[in-house]
Image (spheres, rainbow, N blue to C red):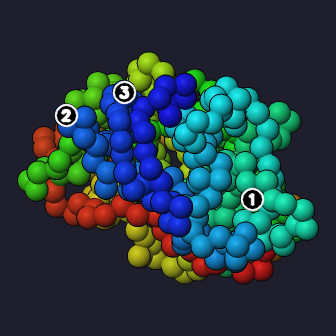
């Protein structure tokens, strides 16, 4: 189902949760973006890939213990328990002959259980029967996360990785930098639970819209070997009628350079569209920037700026910066207080357990150097003539993190 639209009949394997068979196709254009349908025949392997991506990854921190607690062998089985419903899009599955409707089961209009989120955050199994009706069953990513309804708003709560638990703080810093540069973004705040920091943000998807990750956009066309990853993505956007890809990517690449983001893979940015009309709205506000600012490195490593991973287009940030076509939108005066922004976030109450003076100064120094380099680069940059395949990223997967064993 795509909201209220019946898309196709599928048969799921009871033991694995995989799609065994795709039967009658009703509305092929409403299949997830990047799923080929030719003469009524669906690419079942591609559909299973999309379905698997919808589940909690096996690499998620704490997921093994959670599966033991839930007495379930695979996270894909959790998808079936909640009909595949999500707070990121409007896709779901309706059992045959069931009287369910999207209006009666969706998580945008109705509450949901905290049971799965509690277990994913390390709680023991309750004596009562668990309620599996939760969008936590369809949350991706490797860091510990859950959905909560806070003051009537659907909010995503997300942890950090050992040893510094820095990602929640980084989200606030990245949002502050984007605010200064006028880049559309998701706002974050830090909350505390059992002495550990978590980032919180409101869901930017509504009951009428959905997020289409950039990874799905890439799947709409086959890439030629002589075409760069960047150019291929632009080509896919143009073919789909998605506007303003280059200005958006300019801003995202500049942000990721400033904060030395190491995990901007193709599922960490995307487009918005109307679920029922399939009309493209535009690029989603930038979100999920926590794996940055040397989040897993020592102060000396942050200062040296070695081993900084880059995604999604190039392996090195300085090479990726060369893809930017226009720097005129950057107001460098607005970045003069970046060090004060960083200090205010990293010295907030509770942060001292994870942040020491040397670490804070190293982060401030790194950002300052990057802004200075960006200023010089922007002044001397010649217009981009062509997009080379040199230094292209070969795969875009989420970063692995040190498990949060003490939560």
The answer to which of 89 and 361 lies nearer the viewer is 89
Count residues near mark 2 (Cα–Cα under 10 Å), then give few for <14, some for 14-19, many for 20+. Answer: few
Which element carries disc 3, helix, strand or loop?
loop
Mark closest to the chain's N terminus, 3 or 1: 3
The residue shown at (35%, 36%) is: 24
Q: Which circle marks residue 182 in the picture?
A: none
Count residues near mark 3 (Cα–Cα under 10 Å), then give few for <14, some for 14-19, many for 20+. Answer: some
- Left/right placement of residue 70 relative to residue 335 reads right
- Direction left: furthest residue: 226
- Direction front: furthest residue: 97
The residue that label 3 is drawn on is: 27
Classify residue 62 by image quadrant. bottom right
The span from disc 2 to disc 3 (Cα, nearest Å) is 12 Å
Q: Which mark lies nearer to you, 3 or 1?
A: 3
Q: Quadrant of the C terminus?
A: bottom right
The span from disc 3 to disc 1 (Cα, nearest Å) is 33 Å
Give the percent coordinates (x, y) of residue 207: 62, 27
The residue that label 1 is drawn on is: 116
The answer to which of 135 and 194 lies nearer the viewer is 135
Which element carries disc 2, helix, strand or loop?
loop
The residue shown at (76%, 33%) is: 110
Give the percent coordinates (x, y) of residue 190: 77, 53
- Left/right placement of residue 141 relative to residue 52 reads right
Which element carries disc 1, helix, strand or loop?
helix
The residue that label 2 is drawn on is: 39
């Amino acid at each position: 189902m795509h909201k209220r639209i019946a898309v196709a009949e599928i048969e799921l394997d009871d033991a694995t949760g995989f799609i065994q068979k795709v039967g009658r196709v009703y509305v092929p254009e409403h299949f997830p973006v990047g799923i080929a349908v030719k003469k009524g025949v669906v690419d079942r392997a591609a559909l299973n890939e999309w379905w698997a991506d919808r589940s909690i990854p096996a690499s998620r921190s704490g997921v093994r213990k959670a599966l033991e607690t839930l007495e379930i062998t695979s996270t894909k089985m959790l998808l079936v328990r909640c009909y595949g419903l999500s707070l990121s899009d409007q896709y779901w599955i309706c059992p045959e002959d069931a009287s369910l409707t999207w209006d009666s089961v969706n998580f945008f209009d109705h509450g949901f259980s905290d049971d799965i989120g509690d277990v994913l955050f390390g709680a023991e199994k309750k004596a009562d029967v668990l309620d599996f009706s939760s969008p936590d069953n369809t949350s991706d990513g490797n860091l510990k996360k859950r959905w909560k309804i806070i003051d009537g708003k659907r909010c995503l709560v997300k942890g950090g990785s050992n040893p510094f638990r820095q990602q929640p703080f980084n989200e606030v810093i990245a949002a502050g930098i984007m605010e200064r540069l006028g880049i559309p973004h998701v706002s974050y705040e830090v909350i505390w639970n059992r002495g550990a920091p978590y980032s919180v943000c409101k869901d930017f998807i509504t009951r009428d819209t959905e997020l289409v990750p950039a990874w799905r956009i890439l799947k709409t066309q086959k890439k030629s070997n002589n075409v760069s990853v960047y150019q291929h993505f632009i080509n896919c956007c143009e073919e789909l009628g998605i506007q303003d890809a280059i200005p958006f990517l300019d801003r995202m690449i500049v942000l990721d350079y400033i904060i030395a983001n190491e995990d901007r893979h193709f599922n960490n940015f995307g487009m918005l569209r109307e679920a029922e009309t399939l009309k493209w709205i535009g690029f989603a506000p930038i979100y999920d920037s926590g794996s940055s600012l040397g989040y897993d490195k020592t102060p000396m490593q942050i200062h040296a700026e070695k081993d900084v991973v880059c995604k999604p287009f190039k392996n090195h940030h300085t090479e990726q910066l060369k893809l930017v076509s226009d720097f005129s939108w950057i107001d460098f005066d607005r970045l003069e207080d970046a060090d004060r922004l960083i200090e205010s976030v990293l010295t907030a109450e509770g942060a001292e357990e994870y942040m020491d003076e040397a670490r804070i100064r190293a982060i401030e120094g790194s950002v300052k150097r990057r802004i200075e380099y960006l200023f010089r680069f922007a002044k001397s940059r010649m217009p981009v003539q062509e997009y080379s395949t040199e230094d292209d990223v070969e795969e875009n997967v989420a970063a692995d993190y040190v498990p949060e064993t003490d939560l």
